Each structure stands twice: as C-alpha cells, then as structure tokens.
Image (cartoon, helix red, strand yellow):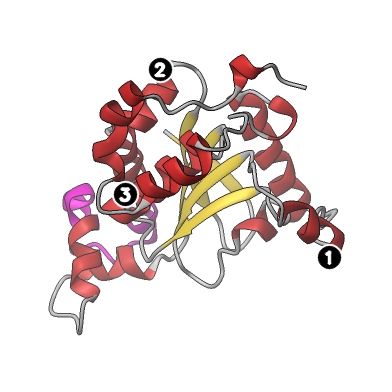
C-alpha cells in the first residue's frame, strides 16, 4: 500500500506548468475531474521501474515470437477488474496496420498497455496529448514507438506523388524523417532504414513534450523506439 505522498497530485503549479499540453485535447478537464477530486497513485502495475516495464514487454514478445504465449489478463474476470480503473504498465504508439495487434505481439491483456495507433505511427498533437495522459495520469512507465516491416505509409511517402483524401497529411508527418530515402521504395534495406528513421523522429517529437520530457528526467518514464518484423513476429529496439 502506498502512502498519501505517492498519490498523483495536480497542483495549481502543475496545472499551469502542463496545462498547455492538455489544451485542445480535453485531457485537462478529464484529469482535473478524476485525478484532482479523487487522487490515485501514479504507479504502474507492481510499481515497476521503466527498465522492468520494458523488460516485461520484450519478454512477452519473445513468448509470442516463439509460439509460447500465455495470453494473460484476457478473461471476463480481468475485464471486470479493470472496469473499476486502469493503471497500464506501458504505453505504445504504433501503426494502425492490422498486422500489428499490440497486446497480442507483446502477449499482454486487458488493462496492461495504453495504446495509440495511426498510420505511420506518427506523433501528431492528439496522439501526444493521449500519451501524456497515459504516462502522467495513468502511470505507464515505458512508452514504445513501433514501426514495422513493409509499412505502407512509409513506402507511400518514399514513393511521393498525389494521394487521395487526407492521406497526404499523414505522409507529410513522415517525410521530414526520411528525406534521404525518397525514391528508394523498391529497396528493402532502404525501406527498413526509412521506417527506423521515422520511428526515431517520432520518439524525438514525443520527448519534446514538456510532460513526457519531465517524466523522463525524473526517471519515471523511458521512451524507446522499436521495429516489428512481420515475418518473425519479433520486436527489436531502435536507436
């Protein structure tokens, strides 16, 4: 049992310090409504460290990639437990690709991972705000940005040209990270390097958040890039 001193506290000073990161996302109101009136401990499951949280993710991926998944926390009982509240030990920004089901590839379950997904795993304003909430308020101890093999968003950016609808807004977020790989979409090695470069770019954007950078500085959070191999199911760390 944690003492009252370990409970999450958004003081007037913290609100002024971090409020800008919540504006436009609605998270400030949510945080004030839930966490100020009824404070809860900002600790991840089992009060683990960022390194322990990362190790737990990587151990789960190793089980998945070697077909030894335990499929934990996936029962109705678990759902009823976390319906009362969540404190995920990890947060993930991944591509929306249907071949990257985060909980499955890390062999985790309900309430374990706070997941944000979009094409190209880009750290747009709304995703950053969500991940600020997942780390500052919910207490996730590791934030993983996952790129993956044969990412259509990265390949389309490398290829260039006109794209329909709002797809171009996604590619515009990726292009600054992969300028040296433009036009090399037929080179598998270049595609992987571009994907990893995009991951590192998005990690940098997340770390530019005052909230996330402060948690990192206090050793309460680790922000890490990763690459997912569709053929083997293995996650490898990037950078």
Q: Earlier in the sequence, mark 1 or mark 2?
A: 1
**Label 2 to label 3: alpha-carbon separation:** 23 Å
Q: Quadrant of the C terminus?
A: top left
Q: Position of residue 104 (x, y in %)?
A: 69, 60
Pointer 1 local density, CA inside 10 Å: few below 14, some 14–19, many at least 20: few
**Membership of 226 in magenta stretch:** no
**Label 1 to label 3: alpha-carbon separation:** 37 Å
Q: Which residue is mark 3?
A: 198
Q: What range of the chain is rendered magenta?
A: 174-193
**Membership of 178 in magenta stretch:** yes
Q: Quadrant of the N terminus?
A: top right
Residue at 35 percent across and 31 percent down: it is 211
Q: Earlier in the sequence, mark 1 or mark 3?
A: 1
Query: Which tag is nearer the camera, tag 1 or tag 3?
Result: 1
Q: Which residue is mark 1?
A: 76
Q: Are marks 1 and 2 in contact (CB under 8 Å)?
A: no
Residue at 56 percent across and 64 percent down: it is 100
Whether residue 74 is visible here, answered yes or no, is yes
Q: Position of residue 45 (x, y in %)?
A: 71, 35
For residue 208, the mark is none
Pointer 2 local density, CA inside 10 Å: few below 14, some 14–19, many at least 20: few
Query: Which tag is nearer the camera, tag 2 or tag 3?
Result: 2
Judged left or right of residue 2, residue 157 is left
Pointer 3 local density, CA inside 10 Å: few below 14, some 14–19, many at least 20: many
For residue 217, the mark is 2
Q: Position of residue 17 (x, y in %)?
A: 28, 26
């Amino acid at each position: 049992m944690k003492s009252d001193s370990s409970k999450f506290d958004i003081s007037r000073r913290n609100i002024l310090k971090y409020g800008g990161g919540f504006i436009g996302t609605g998270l400030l109101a949510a945080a004030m409504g839930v966490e100020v009136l009824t404070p809860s401990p900002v600790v991840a499951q089992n009060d683990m460290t960022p390194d322990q949280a990362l190790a737990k993710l990587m151990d789960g991926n190793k089980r998945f990639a070697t077909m030894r998944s335990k499929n934990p926390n996936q029962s109705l009982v678990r759902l009823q437990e976390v319906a009362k509240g969540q404190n995920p030990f990890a947060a993930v920004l991944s591509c929306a690709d249907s071949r990257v089901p985060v909980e499955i590839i890390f062999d985790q379950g309900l309430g374990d991972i706070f997941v944000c997904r979009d094409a190209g795993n880009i750290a747009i304003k709304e995703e950053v705000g969500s991940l600020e909430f997942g780390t500052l308020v919910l207490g996730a101890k590791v934030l993983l940005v996952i790129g993956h093999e044969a990412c259509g968003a990265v390949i389309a950016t490398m290829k260039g040209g006109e794209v329909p609808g709002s797809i171009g807004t996604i590619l515009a977020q990726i292009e600054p990270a992969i300028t040296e790989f433009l036009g090399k979409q037929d080179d598998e090695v270049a595609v992987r390097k571009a994907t990893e470069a995009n991951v590192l770019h998005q990690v940098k954007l997340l770390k530019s958040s005052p909230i996330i950078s402060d948690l990192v500085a206090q050793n309460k959070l680790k922000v890490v890039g990763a690459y997912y191999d569709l053929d083997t199911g293995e996650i490898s760390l990037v950078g």
